[in-house]
């Protein structure tokens, strides 16, 4: 663990001194418990000397924990009110923190990170899923990111890590798991945030897995969209209007009377592959 070159003020004091009243429009719910933040920063494993991209550092709670873990952090923050507080934090960890002012949705990963990196974020809920889908959907695989450690609403975290035959299982689980390992790493109570959001949260951790052969991402996206568009219907009904889908089901021996939520990720991959065979 790296010590800052001078003592860090409590986060509450940083927020008060820089006038960082939480903005609802920017999805700001800050984490102030440093022990919790150190536990979150430990989720990706040893970060000493590793490059980490953080989205939405805000007053810098998670950023501090990442810096203490020895990471070299590049942080993208949209709220310019936070920049002076982050500049102070950078002075306490010389050479370890670079802050970029901007909208993470508009900044391609490769334009800010030269090489492999980890991504860690207490995401603004409104942009979280869009960023995740972008990171999961890239052409290049394995991707530039080595791991994603991301805070989501509990319900979204459940959907990312869900197993088949559960209510949470659907498109997001398949898009998250078909070439990544996804797990729910930590539940976070709403009272840990300032101000507390209405719902519970959780950290998910994703790492790239091997790219399955013969799968086009766009094919899998279309297949899961159709299958889960009518999730309570039998596949013979929900896939009726997707050309080639019913023949592919038959070719891989999947009963068209089954419903989408009963198919494993591997079974979806088999259907997608058969559609392109
Ligand atoms: N990481 C801090 C923490 O854990 O206390 C703040 C988390 S707060 C939930 C989300 C942060 O993301 C806010 O600081 C907000 O200004 C920032 N943010 C919101 N939308 C953003 C975007 N599109 N790009 C970059 N940062 C954004």
Image: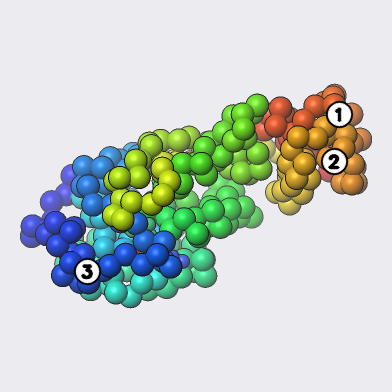
First along the sequence among labels 1 and 2 = 2
Assign a secondary structure to mark 1. Answer: loop
**Label 3 to label 2: alpha-carbon separation:** 52 Å
Q: Is residue 235 visible?
A: yes
- Check disc 2 and report its element: helix, strand or loop: loop
How far apart, in angstroms, are the residues tagged by discs 3 and 1? 57 Å
Residue 23 horizontal/vertical position (percent): 36, 67
Looking at the image, which is closer to me, 166 or 113? Answer: 166
Mark 1 and mark 2: span between their CA atoms? 9 Å
Residue visible at 35% across and 45% down in the picture? 190
> Where is residue 9 drawn, in percent x and y?
11, 59
Identify which residue, 178 or 172, lies in the foreground.
Answer: 172
The residue at the point 32 percent across, 64 percent down is 22
Q: Does 225 sit above or below residue 93?
A: above
In terms of depth relative to the viewer, which is nearer, 35 or 75?
Answer: 35
* Residue ID for mark 3: 85
Mark 1 = which residue? 256
Residue 48 at x, y = what percent? 27, 47
Task: State which quadrant residue 255 falls in.
Answer: top right
Residue at 38%, 52% (x, y): give it.
197
Q: Residues within 10 Å of mark 2 (few under 14, many from 20)?
A: many
CB contact under 8 Å: marks 1 and 2: yes
Q: Are marks 3 and 1 in contact (CB under 8 Å)?
A: no
Q: Which residue is mark 2?
A: 239
């Amino acid at each position: 663990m790296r010590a800052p070159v001078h003592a860090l003020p409590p986060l509450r004091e940083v927020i008060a001194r820089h006038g960082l009243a939480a903005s609802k429009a920017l999805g700001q719910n800050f984490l102030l418990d440093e022990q919790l933040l150190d536990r979150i920063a430990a989720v990706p494993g040893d970060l000493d000397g590793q490059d980490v991209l953080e989205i939405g550092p805000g007053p810098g709670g998670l950023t501090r924990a990442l810096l203490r873990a020895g990471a070299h952090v590049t942080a993208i923050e949209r709220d310019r009110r936070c920049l002076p507080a982050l500049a102070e934090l950078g002075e306490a960890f010389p050479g370890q923190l670079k802050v970029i002012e901007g909208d993470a949705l508009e900044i391609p990963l490769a334009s800010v990170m030269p090489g492999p990196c980890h991504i860690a974020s207490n995401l603004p809920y409104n942009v979280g899923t869009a960023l995740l889908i972008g990171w999961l959907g890239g052409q290049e695989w394995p991707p530039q990111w080595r791991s994603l450690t991301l805070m989501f609403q509990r319900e979204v975290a459940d959907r990312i890590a869900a197993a088949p035959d559960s209510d949470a299982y659907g498109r997001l689980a398949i898009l998250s798991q078909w070439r990544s390992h996804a797990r729910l790493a930590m539940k976070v109570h709403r009272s840990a945030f300032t101000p507390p959001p209405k719902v519970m949260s959780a950290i998910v951790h994703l790492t790239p897995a091997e790219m399955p052969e013969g799968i086009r991402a766009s094919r899998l996206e279309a297949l899961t969209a159709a299958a889960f568009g009518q999730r309570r219907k039998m596949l013979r009904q929900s896939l009726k209007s997707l050309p080639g889908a019913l023949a592919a089901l038959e070719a891989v021996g999947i009963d068209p009377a089954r419903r989408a939520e009963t198919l494993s990720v591997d079974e979806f991959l088999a259907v997608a592959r058969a559609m392109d065979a």
